[in-house]
Amino acid sequence: MAHRLCVLCETSKAIVKRPKTGQQICKECFFNVFETEVHNTISQASLFKPGDRVAIGASGGKDSTVLAYVMKTLNDRYNYGLNLFLLSIDEGITGYRDDSLETVKRNQEQYDMPLKILSYDELYGWTMDSIVQQIGKKNNCTFCGVFRRQALDRGAAMLNVDHIVTGHNADDIAETVLMNIMRGDIARLGRCTMICTQGEDTIKRSKPFKYAYEKEIVMYAYFKKLDYFSTECIYSPEAYRGHARAFLKDLEAARPSAIIDIIHSGEAFEIKEDIKATQKVQQTCKRCGYMSSNELCKACTLLEGLERGMANAGITDRARKKMDAEGPTPQNIRTIPFFQTSTRPGSPQPNNVENPQVTS
Amino acid sequence: MSSCGNPAVESDALMTRKPKYDKSRTCVRCKENTGNLVIRHAVYCKDCFFPLITHRFRRSLEPFVNPKPDGPRRTALKPTGDLLIGYSGGLGSAVLLDLVARCYVTPDKSLVTAEGGRDHPRKDRVWKKVRVCYVEVCDAFPGMPDRTEEIRMAVNKYQDLEFIPLRIQDSFDPKFWKSTGVSPDQLLQYSLDLGTEDLLIASTSTSSEPTAALRAYLAALPTPSALPTILKTLTRLLLLYTAYSTKSSHLVLGTSLTSLAVSLITSITQGGGFHVKEETQEEWRPTYSTGTNDFQPSELPIRIIRPLRDIGMKECGAWAWWMDVKVVGREKWVWPGAKSGIGSLTKDFIVGLEKDYPSTVSTIVRTCGKLAPKGEVDGRCILCERPIQEGIQEWHSRISIRSRADLTGKSESAPRSISRAQPSLTSLLCYTCHTTLTSRSSRSAPPLYPGLSVEKKVPLPVWIDARLSENSLHAGHNEVITGHFLTEGEKRDALKYYLLDD
């Protein structure tokens, strides 16, 4: 039986059926289309300018490992002129994050990029292990998600970078669109398909893999023989996101374009102007200086709840009121250091920028 | 296991199940009777249930009856045409028909309170004529029974209603098209090549009988998911053209809150984010201005309204049960691969979620109600006749490289593989319809009609033939449309006399 030829180059033997298009293509064309699509995403959105200092959010998992590799490849191929860094957050999950961080450290050597590791313990005085010990597995993803977002910004500020790129892929974004519609989170729905988000005082954050299918990222890592760590978090996956993900996987099986179709939908609508006017205005947390939609940011609220032994205070309004009724915030609880971005012109260079440095 | 069937959930990570009702078993409205029904955690007695549903129905319909909204002052309802009810035989449309009959045809005094004196304008019938249109789809599915007569009997239970039975293959019947009164003088016929993603079209002299044309078209669709989407589109267009031909100003559909949530999510999963508004409510007028119908479509669009959009499936069921409404029931659309279709997956998912979290469907509909289309409109889709978002093909080729030209970046300087000799439907389709006709599954599905050979070149619905004919006739020669993708340079050339120097 004759080999089927790649539909793109029409010369080499096709070895994969692209999950995104269903086309049968060869390995070289797969690398080529995957990288070119990411480049198209970056250039269409004008994400970077020459000289930008860009931190790659690295967890050691497949998405961030492939992202680091592709960013380096594209930076060299298209002369983006970027200074790339690896930035890892150590949530403090024994048997999960400590192992994956070893992968990040290997990536640091393989890709010759400076690495900064910032831990929850260092920043908040709590690890996820100790949080789960206090609150159990229920809602622990809320703590982890809120703490990670702020930790990334703080780590980026320490690296003095202009931009953070994360490995969120098309599946993640499609899933978030569905989830935000189903739980009526109109503010997040409005921004979840944006390739780049930036608050007034925060560092730009982008998703170059916005249109890259999770399956293709795995395929790319496999063919390139990239070194990544593959295990689900040992603390249970978020239930509601699990519902949306299971549904999305069914849709993808029925029609592979469903993922990209959902993202297209998310990009094709926006929040009505009169609804936008009713949204909360962004302000600054009075305690830690991070962006917030209330007087206290979510991380400070969650941390105060943990410190006072009332962890649900950051989860439900009722628990929050109960904590307020217990009296004012004690002076002796741990708080998050005041947030300051240091990326403005003339700001001092941190010591750990030029030389790779690992903290743990 | 969780209600949505996700097996990978640990029990302590699940949301806590809410109590079935919030406070007591006493009706929240009259605060006297013991409740008979729980609607989204609130308890209602039977006596209060009927006015509640009637109020929600009228609240969703009446503000859109007059051509211009009246604001807070309530005036007489004066539609500019008749009313057409889209009836499928399902629960929603049966309840809708009952409510329309009780409120606007033969008023039910227990539900509609008398206002004003004997000659008060509100005493007049709102719509002079109310028609019920049913589209029979049995010819699309081998072995499905024809329910037209059963439906006719269910409709005839009500007085003063005219029944219009249609068949799904009418969408391929030039006689139906002629009866709508929008037909150009000469209706040319075209074929569409569904074998490739280019969607090439060509004029054809061979005409097939409507049922054969329908089956050839459906059999060539690329995925099982495309079938219900196409049938829904064909049904919608048949209803719209019937509304036009009967001089109706309003078309009402029995989409309940639950069905609306399902159809919104289904549309979004198929790339229909630009049409979120139309999924809930839309205004439509035919493209043509040369028709024989004396109705003035250019001035009076037909309003498509879903008056049950605030009423869930459960409330519809209770109404039908207590009011003794005959529900013929919709035949299940069974075909090879039906279980894996996007529509059925979405329905199972949403209905499953609604059981444990009854507010989910309402949240979905309310959230989508806060959205507006983003970007510019670039014409109207030739298949579904909804707006086309500008730039969708460019977006597609950028984020999903499918050709060597896209890969090398040469597509920016040369028109894509479509030449004047090979016209394509691509640029005339919205994102959803283009995806429906081109997106393939990695799994191969069994044939829809065993024994029927799948043709790559298939006939097109009559309104597409008509629009292509009109384009061709206006071009002054008898050939298919001569469209192609313009390059940036061509676009700039076309505008060069209007562009100012940078």
Image: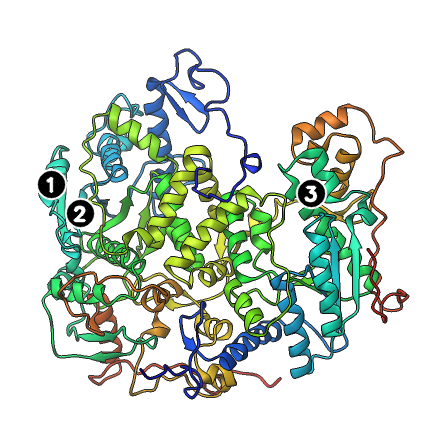
> Where does label 3 land, which residue?
A143
Specify the amino acid type for callout 2: Tyr
Specify the amino acid type for callout 3: Phe
Q: Do labels 1 and 2 share a chain?
A: yes
Seen in the image, is A174 located left or right of residue B49? right
Q: Which residue is drawn at 58% across and 55% down?
A: A192
Kindly report the distance in space between the C-alpha atoms of the residues bearing marks 3 and 1: 59 Å
Kindly report the distance in space between the C-alpha atoms of the residues bearing marks 1 and 2: 9 Å
Which of the pair B313/B84 is nearer the observer? B313
Kindly report the distance in space between the C-alpha atoms of the residues bearing marks 2 and 3: 54 Å
Residue A78 visible in the displayed image: no
In this view, the residue farthest toward the top is B32
> Where does label 1 land, which residue?
B152
Return the x and y of residue A24 as percentages of the image width and height: 41, 76
Specify the amino acid type for callout 1: Arg
Q: Do the residues labelled 1 and 2 touch (CB within 8 Å)?
A: yes
Q: Is residue A252 above or below residue B38?
A: below
